[in-house]
Structures are given as C-alpha cells and as structure tokens.
Image: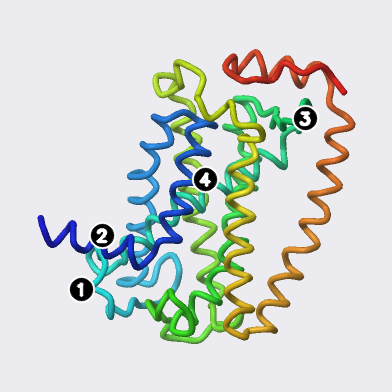
C-alpha cells in the first residue's frame, strides 16, 4: 500500500499538468452535469481508456501496433503496462469534447456579463452530439499525439512508440481510427450517465454562480490544444506547429462567426426550453 501511494504521489509530481486539467474537468463537469456524474465518469472513463490501451499494446487494436517504454515505472503509477496518467487523461479529453460539441450545437446566449449554453436533454443525448464529440476527440489527438511521440524532447519523457512509422509525423492512421472508436464509447458513456435521473443534481451547484461557468468545458478543450501547440513550438517543431495551427485556425474562425450568428438568432423558445429542463440554470435574462 505504501508503494502505491508513493507511486501515486510520484505521478502527481511528474505529471502536474494532467492533474491540473483533471481539476478543471471536475469543476466544469460538476457545474454542468452534477457532482455524481462528474465523479462517476472518472472510473468509467478511465476503465474504457485503459482497456483500449491494454488491448492495443497486446493485440494492436484499436490504435495499431504501439508499445510503452517503462523507464518511469519506479517513479509513477503504471497499471499492467499502461501509465496511469495516460488513461486518466482520456476522462477530461472526452468530456471537453462532449462539452464543445454541445456548445457548437446549442444556442448560446450572452447576457448580463454571463454566457449560457442553451442545451436540452434531447441534444445532450442525441446521435448528432455523439458523432460530433467523437470527431472533436480525434481532433485533439491530431494535435496531441505527434508532439507526445517526441516526449523525450520535453517534460513528458519518451513513454511510447510505434513499431511502424506512420504517415502523419510518425503517427499511423490506425491511431486516429482508434481514437474515434474510443471517443464514441466514452461519449456514449457520458450520455448514458445523463439519462439516469437519480444522478441529477438536487440543488444548484455553487459553481453556477461563477460568470461564464458553462464555457469552462469548451475552454478546457481549447486549452488542451493551445498547451500542446505551445509545447510543439517550444521544442522547435515549427512545421508541425504550423500545420497544427492551420488545422485549428480555420475551424476556430468558423466557430467564432457561427457563435455570433447563433446569438443573433436566439428565440424565446430556446430560453424557455432550457430553463424548463434545467430549473437550476441561472438563465433569467430577456432576449437582447
């Protein structure tokens, strides 16, 4: 037991950025989905991610034939050949992809120094949200994986590699296909949790008093992208960083103008549906 806590503390010390992102996830998901769902998704999401990684390093599915380098096995927590922090990161990556999908598909209201994403239960559980969130999950990996593969050049360290070099900066296409499959499974798990009314919050979250708290999930998504792009440029990978920046710039531009369009076309029905389905929501503002 003492070894477990030693390795767990070592993981936190070695990977503080993972736990910083995880903390943001807990706050965002608790305000969005409630504490029960936010906390329950951690072991569920972790388990899905760990199974996918364990399967891939042994049988090549779903990510392709890759392997982990166990140089830090005596310094941080590993679970049967898989770094604990790696599977854990899937939890906040999948949630922020789900949250970003809801932001893109929902009306967005800017009012009284606050921002409200006027989602509905139907949209939360829809196939459109499931598919979009899964592809947003893959987009994260398009930015993350090439720089993670060069972990020996920054504080991540070289923790994994592919037995056969891939087309996209060393990453095989099978990896992205795997992320799509796993993203689908993890977002579907989130949607399933949302269906259980017993897990719904009984009282308003204190976090809902924070202006713009509904944007914390999408902000987490963007923060992960920016963090990895900054690391990419920091290690001198200008081509990779430029490609990643261009891949991000054009969708971001579309999202910006589409959000302005949605704001201008909000109806009273959008506000009423959201406030009726989520009575703890602070949406009380009139149409601008």
Ranked by sequence position, the earlier of labels 2 and 4 is 2
Which residue in the structure is indicated by mark 3? 109
The residue drawn where x is 44% and y is 84% is 152
Q: Which disc is residue 74 wearing?
A: 1
Q: Looking at the picture, how far across and down is residue 162, in whole percent? A: 43, 81
- Does 222 sit left or right of 73 as displayed? right
**Quarter of the picture holding the N terminus:** bottom left
Alpha carbon separation for disc pair 1 and 3: 50 Å
Q: Secondary structure at mark 3?
A: strand
Crowd tier of the residue under label 1, counting other residues whose Cα lies within 10 Å: few below 14, some 14–19, many 20 or above: few
Disc 4, SS: helix
- Residue 252 at x, y = what percent? 77, 56
Disc 2 packing (10 Å; few <14; some 14–19; many ≥20): some
Label located before the other in sequence (4 or 1)? 1
Question: Mark 3 or mark 2, which is nearer the start of the sequence?
Answer: 2
* Residue linked to disc 4: 95
| Residue at image mark 2 | 9
């Amino acid at each position: 037991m003492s070894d477990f806590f030693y390795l767990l503390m070592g993981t936190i010390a070695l990977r503080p950025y993972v736990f910083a992102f995880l903390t943001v996830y807990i706050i965002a998901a608790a305000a969005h989905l409630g504490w029960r769902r936010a906390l329950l998704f951690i072991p569920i999401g972790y388990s899905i991610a760990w199974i996918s990684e364990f399967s891939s390093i042994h049988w090549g599915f779903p990510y392709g034939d890759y392997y982990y380098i166990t140089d830090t096995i005596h310094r941080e927590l590993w679970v049967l050949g898989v770094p604990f922090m790696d599977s854990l990161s899937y939890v906040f990556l999948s949630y922020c992809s789900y949250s970003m999908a809801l932001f893109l598909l929902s009306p967005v209201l800017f009012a009284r120094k606050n921002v409200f994403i006027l989602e509905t239960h139907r949209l939360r559980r829809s196939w459109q949200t499931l598919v979009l969130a899964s592809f947003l999950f893959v987009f994260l990996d398009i930015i993350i994986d090439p720089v993670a593969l060069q972990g020996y050049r920054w504080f991540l360290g070289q923790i994994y590699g592919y037995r056969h070099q891939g087309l996209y900066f060393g990453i095989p296409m099978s990896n992205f296909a795997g992320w799509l499959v796993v993203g689908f499974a993890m977002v579907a798990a989130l949607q399933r949790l949302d269906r259980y009314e017993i897990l719904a919050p009984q009282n308003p979250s204190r976090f809902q008093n924070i202006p713009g708290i509904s944007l914390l999930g999408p902000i987490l998504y963007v923060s992960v992208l920016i963090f990895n792009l900054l690391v990419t440029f920091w290690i001198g990978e200008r081509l990779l960083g430029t490609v990643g920046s261009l891949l991000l710039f054009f969708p971001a531009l579309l999202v910006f103008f589409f959000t302005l369009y949605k704001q201008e076309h909000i109806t009273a029905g959008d506000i009423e549906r959201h406030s009726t389905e989520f009575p703890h929501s602070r949406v009380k503002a009139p149409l601008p």
